[in-house]
Image (cartoon, helix red, strand yellow):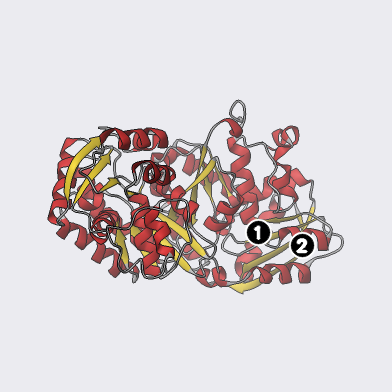
Amino acid sequence: MAAKQGGAQKGSYRIGLLVPSSNTTVEPEFYRALPVNVTLHTARLFLTEITPEAIFKMVEELEAQSRLLASADVDVVMLGATAPSFLKGLGYDREVIARIEKAAGKPATTTSTALLRALRFLGAKRVVLGSAYDDKVNAIARGFLEANGFKVVAARGLGMVDNLAVGRLGPESAFDLARGVDQADADAMVLACTNWRTMDVIERLERELGKPVVSTSQVSVWDALRMIGYRREIPGYGRLLRSLAAEDLLAAVA
Amino acid sequence: MYGWRGRIGLLVPSINTTMETEFWRTAPPGVSVHTARIAGGRHGTPEELRGMESASKQAAKEVAMVEPDVVVYGCTSGSFFEGPEWNRKISEQLSEITGAPAVTTAGAMAACLIGGGYKKVDVVTPYVEVTNERLKQFLKAHGVEVVTLGTFDMLDMFDHAKIEPGEIYRKVREITTPKAEAVFVACTQLRALEVLDRLERDLGKPVYSAVQASAWQAYQAMGVDPGIADCGSLLRNLSEPGVTEARGKDRKPA
């Protein structure tokens, strides 16, 4: 989608966010990072467990909830959920985007799409994956990244299935896991699951690890803002959100 | 976990773009807002307003999964249209589904006016005539007389958000008379929150709004003092000891 003329500074913009119903993290993490002229409007998709079966059921509601967001005339729809946008592997995020765009009549993106774009934008080739997931879902995440051309040099998950319990974890859990799983030869750290609190620790992790850290909440904010044409840096949440002012570079991502 | 002081489950008509924004604007540290959308039309016809009652049950099931401390039904006309009993029914249903205390905007409107001891009020709405009549009847049933009602007279509920805060300020100034002890600005889609303080200063009487009254009841239900100083006396008074229990009509806005 082309940026609106003049960028977002001149107007106000609405981001439509689809979240799994049991997610308690992504709305606060969006709100703290969003500039004042961009507002967030949420619709919920039923999900209790991060299992393939529960997620497939959740995705059935995509069209109905996308239409509710369209009625609020949002400028972009973001499926702010990681596993539901990579579950069937290569190209699945595109399939989900097509469904949302058809139902909503608005440009759409997903967390997984945003993750791929962010890694390409940062020039990362070899990544480390830290997630809240159990081995089964973590393996699917790894497969999705590798099918999209990234080498996953190490991966570790917290082994969690209960989504509400993920939301109860403090930000130190992401910090600790990232430090434990990092590899010197990786050029970016990926922290996956939008219900996992990461925004507080990205900046500190980047300093400690000496490489870009992307989390699924952060890339979701970044891609939604990029798509509405917002072109100012957002400080405090890592290199990626500061990069929003780099208009020329961002144009290459789309 | 986000929302460690309190998690608000907010149900808004799908077309609403104001209430989430104003709730987040007033949320203090430790309070999070989690939204689900109520399916329905954008024209506020009697059929649409009645349909929101059943549609709100679905939205409540979605937001129940964040285990909210309070659930808010964020629509004024959608809660007063069929009278006090209907409003009570909506409130009880939502409470039963979510396991949390429920606040409806119409209930909050009546409660803040009754709590202040106000018997004669002016009201500003965006509604058409049939809806305005129902609003008057609802307040009459609670012992509150509408002296003057000023309306923007717009059927399209989405467009209610396009009315600028300054226009709301001027409408209140234009219609209110000394006979009214207080003014209420109805409709959670009207961006009244940011002009309430100015209106109270300039008129020397309380001016409340639909979003503000809903937030006021939600914070009372959670037992959280939001410490909100700049969104009118109703919310500011929550921070004064004893005020939430017994607010007298002799209390002037600060």
Type of residue at label 1? Met
Q: Percent position (x, y) of residue A45?
A: 43, 56
Which image quarter: residue B167? top left
The label shown at residue A205 is 2
* Dot placed on the residue nearer the N-terminal end, 1 or 2: 1
Residue A4 visible (yes or no): yes
Residue occupying image coordinates x 34% and y 36%: B160
User: Is disc 1 in the same subunit as disc 2?
Assistant: yes
Q: Residues within 10 Å of mark 2 (few under 14, many from 20)?
A: many
The label shown at residue A199 is 1
Chain of the residue under the numbered disc 1 shown in the image? A
Residue A125 is left or right of residue A35, and the answer is: right
Q: Seen from this angle, which residue lies furthest right?
A: A184
Looking at the image, which residue is at 82% across and 63% down? A208
User: For numbered disc 2, what is the local secondary structure?
Assistant: helix
Of all chains, the one bearing label 2 is A
Number of marks in picture: 2
Q: Residues within 10 Å of mark 1 (few under 14, many from 20)?
A: many
Closest to the observer: B215 or B20?
B215
> What is the number of the mark on residue A220?
none
Give the structural element (helix, strand or loop) at label 1: loop
Q: In 3D space, how far apart are the residues under numbered discs 1 and 2 (Cα atoms)?
A: 10 Å
Q: Position of residue B215 (x, y in %)?
A: 38, 57
The residue most toward the top is: A5
Q: Residue at x 72, y 59 (%)?
A: A202
Q: Nearer the viewer, residue B103 or A50?
A: B103
- In the image, residue A158 lies at what x, y percent? 65, 73
Place of residue B105 in the rendered image (x, y in percent of width and height, measured from the top left):
29, 54
- Residue type at mark 2 is Leu
